[in-house]
Amino acid sequence: MLEQCIATSEPAYLAKHAFQLAQEFNNFYHRHHILTEEDPARKTFLLSTAAVALRELVVVLAWLGIESPEAM
């Protein structure tokens, strides 16, 4: 994504990507009740998925020069 933004001189694509990532995670979080999940394996999977989304969102925000909050 970053390379595409640089190649096309369109930083707005990166901002759009960050927004879409946040929206998708928001939808995921509302569909899957992670903290109340009773199946330990499924809960681990959901927490891992959330961790990946957090990591990617922090990276994209850093590319945009936006500091991520301690908690989201």
Image (cartoon, rainbow, N blue to C red):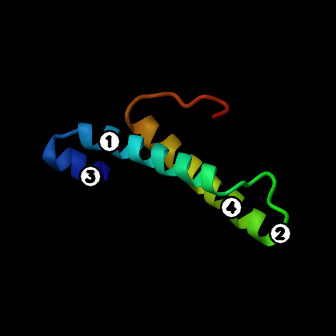
Residues packed near mark 4 inside 10 Å, few (<14), some (14 to 19) or many (20 plus): some
Query: Disc 3 on helix, strand or loop?
Result: helix
Residue occupied by mark 4: 46
Q: Tell me if label 3 and label 2 are in contact, CB under 8 Å.
A: no
**Mark 1 or 3 closer to N-term?**
3
Under mark 1, the amino acid is Lys
In this view, the residue in front, 24 or 52, is 24
Q: Report whether 15 appears left or right of 44.
A: left
Under mark 3, the amino acid is Glu
* Residue 44 seen in the figure: yes
Q: Report whether 15 appears left or right of 5.
A: right
Q: Which mark is residue 3?
A: 3
The correct choice, above or below, for 59 with respect to 28 in the image is: above
Q: Which mark is residue 45?
A: none
Residue occupied by mark 1: 16
Tell us which disc is closer to us: 1 or 3.
Answer: 1
**Mark 3 or 4 closer to N-term?**
3
The percent position of residue 45, horizontal first and vertical second, equals 70, 66
Residue sitting at the far left = 8
Residues packed near mark 2 inside 10 Å, few (<14), some (14 to 19) or many (20 plus): few
User: Marks 3/2: CA distance?
Assistant: 40 Å
User: Marks 4/1: CA distance?
Assistant: 25 Å
Residue occupied by mark 2: 39
User: Marks 1/2: CA distance?
Assistant: 35 Å
Q: Residue at x 46, y 45 (%)?
A: 23
The percent position of residue 41, horizontal first and vertical second, equals 79, 71
